[in-house]
Amino acid sequence: MVKLHLSKFLTIFIVLTIVLILIAICNQDDAPVHVKPPEHIWELAKMANFGGKDGTRVLQKFGEKEEVFVVDVLQNDVIFRAVLLNKKFIGDFIGNAALKPPIFNGSLPTAIWELDHGRILPGTLHESQLIQIYKSGILPFSKSFEGNALVFGVGTGAVFMYLQYHFTEMTITGVKLSKEKIAVAEKWFDFSPTRGNNLYVQDIAEFLNDEKEENNKYDMIIADVGIGFDCPPDSLITEEFLKNLRKNMKPTGVISINLLRLGVPNLLQKYEEIRNKFAKYFESCEIFKINSLTNAILTCFCSKKLEKSRDPTNFLRSIGIKTKF
């Protein structure tokens, strides 16, 4: 009799467990994007990979003239993967991508951790770009938006994969010039376009020369491209390029561009000059200075912003962005 009751109990327990798992899967869009492991596992992960202190672990080195390192980083109790340009620029990480900490085994080396494509690291360039795009209230607050997005200057593919993760009905196009850097993105950052999303190995100016049909024009453009530390390079702020760029956007399109100039006196004045060039072809353009970074963000709108913008806070939280703005 006792065995019978135990058997029934186990059956009920297994059924309830399966039901709870199915419910969790069905509600995964509403679940937190990032789950931190238990504290003792997290401490073990930090100790095993970084000796418990902020620092970097080099995974691979590329290039001869310019040293490029793929590194895993422990910084401010967050572990992420990034690209590091020359060891003398310690701290200037580009292409940050979140990693999924192991839930059960903290001693696993970070090199085999999964990439967390559903998460944008707080305080980064791409997070700030997405906040500025959605603060305008022009684009729909919907993960099922059937729009077109263009990412040029794909980098490690982090923002491309983030959009692909959250916006399942959106068509995403990436444009990048370097085949070598694409290979790095595929190997270390799990870059893999799916669902009809595409990557073109091409100069962005050449890519935009072929004017798109109306239904193939872009609702959203995220740009982070430069030559050295000039973003965007002078070749991408000419009248010809900007006119072509605007032609390839929808009437309600929004573009967000990384601005960076190193060693330039009167930096904000230089950014204002770039803004004025873009403003000739857009309804309005705004500069947002990222705290503690030399970078700024230029966001331009093809249509007038709403007089009273909708609050994007809840929508941004639904796609893993919780930073206050």
Image: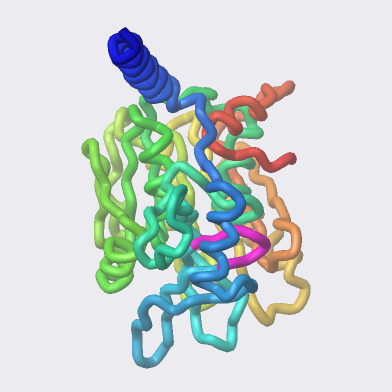
Verify whether residue 273 appears in magenta.
no
Residue depicted at 74% across the width and 64% down the height: 292
Q: Is residue 205 visible?
A: no
Left/right of residue 184 with respect to residue 81 in the rendered view? left
Q: From the image, which quarter does the C terminus lie in? A: top right
Left/right of residue 206 with respect to residue 55 in the rendered view? left
Determine whether 230 is above or below 304 in the image: below
Residue 194, picture quadrant: top left
Q: Position of residue 318 (x, y in %)?
A: 55, 29
Q: Give the color scheme: rainbow, by chain, secondary structure or one colour.
A: rainbow
Q: Position of residue 162 (x, y in %)?
A: 43, 44
Residue depicted at 36% across the width and 13% down the height: 9
Furthest toward the front, the residue is: 1
Q: Position of residue 280 (x, y in %)?
A: 59, 48
> Is the magenta region chiefly helix, strand or loop?
strand
Q: From the image, which quarter does the N terminus lie in? A: top left
Determine whether 56 is above or below 125 in the image: below
Residue depicted at 63% across the width and 66% down the height: 75
Furthest toward the left, the residue is: 196
Determine whether 260 is above or below 197 in the image: below
Q: Position of residue 134 (x, y in %)?
A: 59, 34
Residue 217, picture quadrant: top left
Instruction: Compare residues 278 and 295 and report the one nearer the observer.
Output: 295
Determine whether 102 is above or below 132 in the image: below
Q: Is residue 53 visible?
A: yes
Q: Which residues are magenta?
A: 74-80
Instruction: Compare residues 70 and 235 and report the one nearer the observer.
Output: 70
Furthest toward the bottom, the residue is: 65
